[in-house]
Image (cartoon, rainbow, N blue to C red):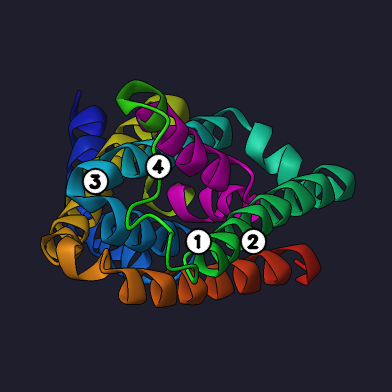
Amino acid sequence: MQTIMMSRMDLIFSLPAFALAVVLISASPGPAMALILRRAALHGFSGAVPTVLGLEAGLYLWALLAATGLAALVAASEIAYLILRVLGGGFLLYLGFKAWRTAWRDRSPEAPAEEPEPGPSLSWWKAFGEGAVVMLANPKAAAFMIAFYPQFVPADRPLFATTALLAVIQVAIEIVLYLALAAVVGRAGAWFRRPAIRRRLEAVSGTVLVALGVRMVTESR
């Protein structure tokens, strides 16, 4: 009983360091941040919500795969790592070229001020899927999970259950941070959606996504 209590205390005492690490990691620029900023600027806070949830669903799945050892197999396999790298980079390139195409199309005086949406329900799932794919097709996420979580799992605690708990905490923290960021950006949505500003934003965000995609495809481990 005393051993169990000490193990729980070790886990509790490690939580502040874990939370701080999550905040610092979440604030670092990358595909997730670029995707959220673009979505919030062009579609407002509500438009960014499914993107954030999709990213976090992908992150939680990677955490569970790390706990079962599958993420380690993916990270260790040259072929699996390469496939994920190409798929993830290719998807970022697709999103970047799509943004460029929108920016080019909006140069026309007859271009609509808003990008047409396929419908509320379909648009929600499309944004959710984009976020999930960006996270799941990122091999760096697998490498990160297998290196990050073991530092905060006491040796005498069950690996899967503790990792799942820590992942819930990380997902909760990131959802709060990302939605707060989306809310701030979304408040200026009317300005971002002005035709000239929107066109420049699409061009810039497209360039960032393409650069991230190229880096993911060409970057070694």
- Mark found first going from the N terminus, 1 or 4: 1
Q: Nearer the viewer, residue 183 or 1?
A: 183
Residue 65 drawn at (x, y percent): 57, 31
Residue 97: assigned label? 2
Residue 128 drawn at (x, y percent): 41, 34
Q: CA distance from mark 3 to mark 4?
A: 27 Å
Q: What residue is drawn where x is 34% and y is 22%? A: 121
- Mark found first going from the N terminus, 1 or 3: 1
Residue type at mark 3 is Ile
Q: Nearer the viewer, residue 180 or 13?
A: 180
Question: Is residue 93 among what the camera can see?
Answer: yes
Disc 1 designates what residue? 31
Q: Which residues are magenta?
A: 124-149
Disc 3 designates what residue? 175
Disc 4 designates what residue? 116
Residue type at mark 4 is Pro
- Mark found first going from the N terminus, 3 or 4: 4
SS at badge 1: helix
On screen, residue 192 versus residue 74, left or right, reads left
Residue type at mark 1 is Pro
Confirm or deny contact between disc 2 and disc 4 (CB under 8 A). no
Residue type at mark 2 is Phe
Residue 94 drawn at (x, y percent): 66, 53
SS at badge 2: helix
Q: CA distance from mark 1 to mark 4?
A: 24 Å
SS at badge 3: helix
